[in-house]
Amino acid sequence: MLTEEDVVARVSRLTVTRLRVFVSEGFIKPETDTQPAYSEADLARAALICNLEDELGFDQEDVPVLLSLIDQIHGLRAELQGFVEAIEELPAETRTTVRLRIAQRRRR
């Protein structure tokens, strides 16, 4: 786990104050016992938010919507991965049938 100082040191344009705003807005949810403890995912999310605001010019009010959409994409990717894994467990003949049906639907 990372401290506030670790996260700030590793994300350019991030200050402790800015990180605390991200936490207070609910953009980042560190584990807390006595002090916040940040994961690598929290670090990546902080960097993403800084890029959205600083590099891409989004306002702070836009960030919750963008993060929600990104989270939905990640959730869908995880669900799709589950489907792929389930299909891979099927007998070869069934997998072939599924692949053919997917290909047919793409051509429509």
Image (cartoon, rainbow, N blue to C red):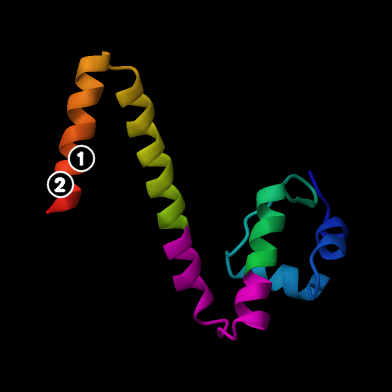
Q: Residue at x 15, y 36 (%)?
A: 101
Can the viewer see residue 31 in this picture? no
Q: Which element type, helix, strand or loop, lies under badge 1? A: helix
Location of residue 92 (image quadrant): top left
Magenta highlight range: 49-70
Reply yes or no: does residue 58 show up in magenta. yes
Q: Nearer the viewer, residue 12 or 37?
A: 12
Amino acid bearing label 2: Arg
Residue 91's tag is none
Relative to 25, does residue 90 appear above or below in the rendering? Answer: above
Q: Secondary structure at mark 2?
A: helix
In which quadrant of the rendered view does residue 87 lie? Answer: top left
- x and y, in percent, of residue 72 in the image: 40, 56
On the rendered image, what quadrant is the C terminus found in?
bottom left
Residue corresponding to mark 2: 105
Residue 36 lies within the magenta run: no
Q: Residue at x 82, y 70 (%)?
A: 16
Estimate the spatial distance between the alpha carbons at disc 1 and disc 2, rounded to whole Å. Answer: 5 Å
Task: Give the main secondary structure of the magenta stretch.
Answer: helix
Identified by mark 1, the residue type is: Ile
Q: Which residue is depicted at the point 83% across and 65% down? A: 8
Q: Residues within 10 Å of mark 2 (few under 14, many from 20)?
A: few
Label 2 near label 1: C-beta < 8 Å? Answer: yes
Q: Label 1: which residue?
A: 102
Q: Is residue 90 visible?
A: yes
